Image: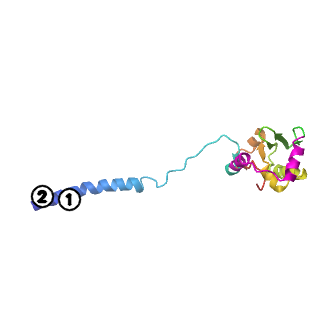
Amino acid sequence: MKNRFTYVIIILLLVTIPVVLYFYLTKNGPFKPAVPPPTTQTSNAPIQLNQEKEQLLESLVKNRKPLVEVDQKAKDALIQQPNPLLETPEYVVVYDQKDDMFQVEIRTIKISTVQSEVVQWFKSKGFSGAAVCTLPIQFSIDKQDAESLRGSGTVFNPLPPGC
């Protein structure tokens, strides 16, 4: 009787141990990665948009802060002019009355140069540095120049530098 009991225990252990090991190893062990592989998102966009800055731009548009008097006067004077407010071979600045924002289309791959020039232009029109960030001003790049930057790893910032 005692021999029979011992055989039953041994058989139970021989069956139970592999089953427990199987579930343990497939859940935590080398058969299954602890962290799932990252998903790769493929995009047809030639350049990547800085998502953090894009969200900040959306927030600036939705949660407008009033401009100080000097900046408001500069804005009022500027938006009385017909569009385009400024046009060069490398960029064009317009005021979008519907969205109450300034938009700059960049027509070159020299993105940071254009952004700096545009900021200086706004300052020359009487805007403070703070207003340049809160007007808001949205930068975009034309399709042809964006395409020429494909594969360069360029991350495009739709806001003025420093904002």
Residue drawn at point x = 54 percent, y = 50 percent: 38
Dot 2 amino acid type: Arg
Locate residue 159 relative to residue 85 in the image: left or right: left
Q: Quadrant of the C terminus?
A: bottom right
* Cα–Cα span, label 1 and label 2: 10 Å
Residue 151 visible in the current orientation: no
Circle 1 residues within 10 Å: few <14, some 14–19, many ≥20: few
Locate residue 25 relative to residue 113 in the image: left or right: left
In the foreground, 131 or 70: 70
Against 147, residue 21 (above or below) is: below
**Tag 1 near tag 2, CB within 8 Å:** no
Residue drawn at point x = 90 percent, y = 52 percent: 124
Residue 76 among those drawn in magenta: yes
In the foreground, 57 or 29: 57
Magenta residue span: 54-80
Residue drawn at point x = 11 percent, y = 62 percent: 2
Identify the mark nearer the N-term, 1 or 2: 2
Instruction: Report the residue marked by disc 1.
Output: 10
Instruction: Report the residue marked by disc 2.
Output: 4
